[in-house]
């Protein structure tokens, strides 16, 4: 464990001495990531169940959902912009101020969506306001990077890097479980008219409360002297965006493409199947949300299992094998969504197991690719770019392909992600063989 220091990153005396244990960091990381993913999934579910009817009732159901998914992608476009903006705040005013502004901006955008007027009230302004608020969510998400996953990996005991790398990823299925549970509750207990009028708005208000809890949980760690010491010694120091691109361009590109299989699958088992079930079957959305909850529990177990597997066989090997598994999955699994409840359950559980095994380690693979002095900003940049390329347009593209060319066509998008991951891993392996710096685990 690293020793503490008596100064903060601003050079001021620390108010107290406190040694951060890996378990304490892990709790802060899980709370923070669960909060972010809860916000994410609340919006994603509403993109299927609410916004097509609320903001685009002048279109048919498919067109309205595609418009909703197009707006969904705006946050992923905005995230790199938010990262650049908040990196300036980080360097000038410090991590605590940056996180506070970013999380309150995220909560404010989310709550404002809860107050969104419908098309009957303001016409096309309903969709326009949704675009503005979704872009605001993306800007804020770009500023929520706190470096805690890097701090966690720096404090990981020897031989347990894979175990500690998977901890931040648990926030994704946990956030999905809570968001799906809330929407399923309101959908089943309210009339369709009441749900569309006011019931869907409550999960967005809950998001603000969760963000406040997450903010204090993260600030409790960020404000400690040990964190300040790592900041002071460059290990968690934000570097200028252009400098990071200049010095670490190769690692950024590889890091952006290496997780594409995982990130593409992420939306193929969370957002896309819900849209398909709502549009193409007579099944209740609440029933499918319960299937998502159960499947996400398998995802939690798979993410946890990815840690010891990666520590035993190597992170790169695990990601490569999972990418090949995703490629196979893309060839037959989408058709299962037309095979009734049994097919849906098989599609979801198999998808979440594959997702958990690879998603559990992609963040650690990205972080470890960078030298210490560039890890904080480099990891944030590659994560934002990977989400943009691999996941941002996945629901829109997959639903469009499936609707116009059949379910099997949606697997093409997923297959492209698997191919990109395998190519990125091969390029990185060749770089290591030729002596180019890169991730070696």
Image (tube, rainbow, N blue to C red):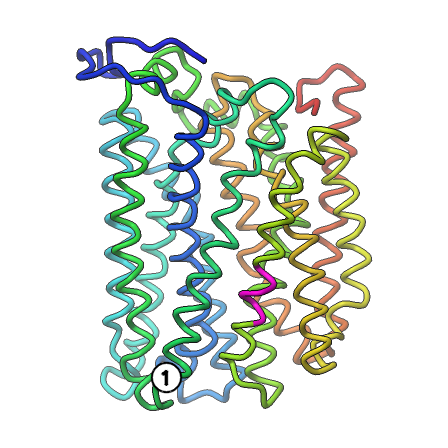
Q: What residue range appears in magenta? A: 291-296
Q: Quadrant of the N terminus?
A: top left
Q: Position of residue 44 (x, y in %)?
A: 46, 66
Which is the main secondary structure of the residues drawn in magenta? helix
Q: Examine the image and state in which quarter residue 258 appears.
A: top right
- Please determine whether, in this image, residue 320 is positioned above or below residue 178: above
Between 438 and 31, the residue placed more toward the observer is 31
- Does the magenta segment cover residue 293? yes
Residue at image position (75%, 63%) is 412
- Please determine whether, in this image, residue 387 is positioned above or below residue 345: above
Residue at image position (60%, 56%) is 266
Q: Examine the image and state in which quarter residue 222 appears.
A: top left
- Does the magenta segment cover residue 292? yes
- Please determine whether, in this image, residue 284 is positioned above or below residue 81: below
Residue at image position (69%, 29%) is 311
Between 62 and 3, the residue placed more toward the observer is 3
Residue at image position (24%, 40%) is 100
Q: Quadrant of the C terminus?
A: top right
Between 211 and 184, the residue placed more toward the observer is 184
* Disc 1: CA contacts within 10 A as few (<14), some (14-19) or many (>=20): few
Q: Position of residue 77 (x, y in %)?
A: 46, 52
Q: Position of residue 14 (x, y in %)?
A: 20, 14
Callout count: 1
Q: Which residue is mark 1?
A: 189
SS for dot 1: helix
């Amino acid at each position: 464990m690293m020793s503490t220091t008596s100064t903060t990153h601003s050079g001021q005396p620390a108010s107290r001495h406190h040694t951060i244990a890996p378990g304490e960091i892990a709790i802060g990381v899980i709370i923070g990531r669960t909060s972010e993913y809860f916000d994410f999934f609340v919006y994603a579910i509403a993109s299927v169940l609410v916004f097509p009817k609320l903001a685009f009732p002048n279109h048919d159901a498919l067109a309205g959902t595609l418009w909703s998914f197009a707006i969904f992608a705006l946050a992923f476009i905005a995230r790199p912009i938010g990262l650049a903006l908040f990196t300036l705040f980080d360097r000038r005013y410090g991590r605590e101020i940056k996180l506070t502004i970013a999380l309150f901006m995220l909560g404010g955008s989310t709550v404002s969506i809860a107050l969104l007027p419908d098309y009957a009230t303001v016409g096309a302004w309903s969709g326009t306001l949704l675009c503005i608020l979704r872009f605001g969510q993306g800007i804020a998400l770009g500023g929520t990077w706190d470096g805690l996953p890097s701090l966690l990996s720096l404090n990981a005991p020897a031989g347990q890097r894979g175990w500690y790398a998977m901890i931040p990823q648990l926030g994704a299925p946990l956030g999905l479980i809570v968001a799906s549970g809330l929407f399923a509750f309101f959908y089943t207990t309210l009339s369709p008219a009441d749900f569309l009028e006011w019931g869907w708005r409550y999960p967005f208000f809950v998001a603000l409360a969760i963000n406040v809890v997450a903010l204090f949980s993260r600030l409790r760690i960020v404000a400690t002297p040990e964190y300040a010491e790592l900041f002071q010694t460059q290990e968690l120091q934000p570097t200028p965006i252009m400098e990071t691109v200049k010095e670490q361009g190769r690692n950024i590109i590889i890091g952006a493409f290496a997780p594409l299989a995982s990130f593409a699958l992420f939306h193929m088992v969370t957002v896309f199947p819900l849209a398909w079930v709502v549009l193409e079957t007579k099944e209740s959305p609440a029933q499918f949300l319960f299937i998502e909850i159960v499947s996400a529990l398998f995802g939690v177990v798979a993410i946890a299992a990815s840690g010891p597997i990666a520590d035993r066989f190597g992170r790169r090997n695990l990601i490569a094998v999972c990418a090949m598994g995703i490629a196979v999955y893309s060839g037959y699994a989408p058709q299962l969504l037309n095979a009734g409840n049994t097919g849906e359950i098989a599609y979801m559980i198999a998808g979440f197991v594959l997702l958990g095994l690879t998603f559990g380690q992609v963040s650690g693979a990205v972080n470890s690719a960078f030298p210490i002095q560039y890890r904080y900003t480099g990891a944030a940049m590659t994560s934002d770019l990977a989400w943009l390329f691999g996941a941002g347009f996945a629901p829109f593209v997959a639903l469009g392909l499936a609707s116009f060319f059949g379910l099997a066509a949606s697997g093409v998008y997923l297959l492209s992600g698997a191919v990109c991951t395998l190519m990125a891993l091969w390029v990185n392996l060749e770089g290591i063989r030729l002596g180019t710096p890169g991730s070696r685990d």
